Amino acid sequence: MKTQIKRGVLFLALSFLVLLISCKTDNDEIINAPLDQVLKLNSKVATLILKTTMNDGSKDNILDGSSCFSIDLPVTINVNGLEIMIDSEQDFQIVEEIFDEFEDDLDELDLIFPITVILSDFSEIVIENDQQLEELIESCDIEDEDEDIECLDFEYPFTVSVFDPQNELIQSITFTSDKELFDFINDLDEDDIVNVDFPITVILSDGAETIINNLDQLENVIEAVIDDCDENDLTAERFTQVITIGSMKVQKYKDNENNETENYDGYVFNFYSDGTSAVTIENENDDDAQGTITTTINGTWSVTTRVDGGLNATFDFGAEEPLSKLNIEWNVKKIKDKRIMFDNRNGEGISKDELFFIKN
């Protein structure tokens, strides 16, 4: 009798186990994600994806002069006295054409406030006036303003699968934009198991498409092209084009780590294609008369290409300080639409001096 009871209990237990297994639904599907397709928080490839999908603030530098953010379109601007509406990135060409119409005029661009700016993480800030805009630009960490990776784009849509710790498929998510992918990567948790549904396609800066089959390949491709855009812009022709259009001012000057930028307040630099330059200095009148005293100092500039492909720039602004402190051979660090960055290095390669010119 006891044997029959034990058999009955065992039969019921086995039946219950079979019932549990049979009751699992399609939503409880167990899938072992391939290790080379699993995206983890704080992994190198996750960081590279995050930087690739950041909002690229450099595309509209002709409007705001900063790569830290972009202006939300549409926006109304005044260019050399003409009021125009910028509805899309294609309209930036209109501004370029107005600037290029005359070679010897002083190009001016004014934004009509309020405007909304979009930061690298896609958060938005409303800017009410020029002062707020300048404060935002100054607060931008210049060394990190190009943290985003501009030389590679993802082709959308593509999909990822999200699993729980038991490798059960929770959901599939399809991305259609950089913002969607950035937000997803930025919100990853340590316990999240994310499987990228390869293959995916990336588009390089020259328009070529590359098919990616796993995360290792994606990491290698991003790292291989990460500096391509900056390197392609670092030419003597590009340098001359940027420095000779419009006037410039000193955004930053550091002498052996001492920040002396304020010494160049009121200094306006004009560089000409024949290798000459003119610096206009406005100082407050010392006597009781109203207004300012304007002084112009003429000089020269040149740029040469080194054996390693880098650029050296040399300025001669005369013998008087503070301009004479700029009369050295500078390494051209970066060239942007509205900014040129220089540094001067000692024998160990450590930057001792830094000079940033920005469009006035």
Image (cartoon, rainbow, N blue to C red):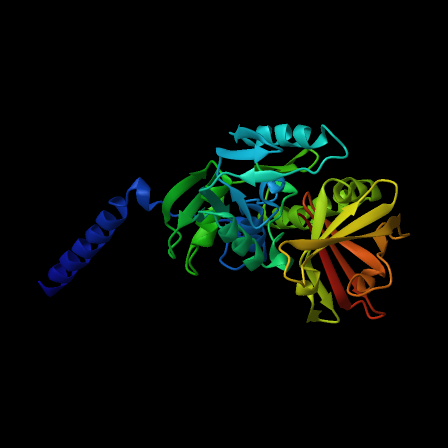
* Residue placed most toward the observer, 92 or 123: 92
Q: Check the image and report above or below for 108 versus 322.
A: above
Outermost right residue: 307
Residue at left offset 69%, top offset 46%: 336
Residue at left offset 19%, top offset 58%: 10
* Residue placed most toward the observer, 129 or 70: 129
Q: Is residue 113 left or right of residue 148?
A: left
Residue 221 screen position, x and y as percent: 67, 46
Q: Check the image and report above or below for 329 versus 203.
A: below
Residue 246 screen position, x and y as percent: 72, 41
Outermost left residue: 1
Task: Kindly indicate the quadrant of the structure image that contains residue 349.
Answer: bottom right
Q: How many labels does the image show?
A: 0
Outermost front residue: 288
- The N terminus: image quadrant: bottom left
Residue at left offset 77%, top offset 68%: 350
Q: In this view, does 313 lie to the left or right of 251?
A: right
Q: Check the image and report above or below for 34 versus 143.
A: above
Q: Is residue 336 left or right of residue 349?
A: left
* Residue placed most toward the observer, 184 or 102: 102
Residue at left offset 41%, top offset 59%: 191
Q: Check the image and report above or below for 255 versus 77.
A: below
Residue 88 screen position, x and y as percent: 53, 30
Residue 172 screen position, x and y as percent: 40, 41
- On the question of residue 215 being in view, the answer is yes
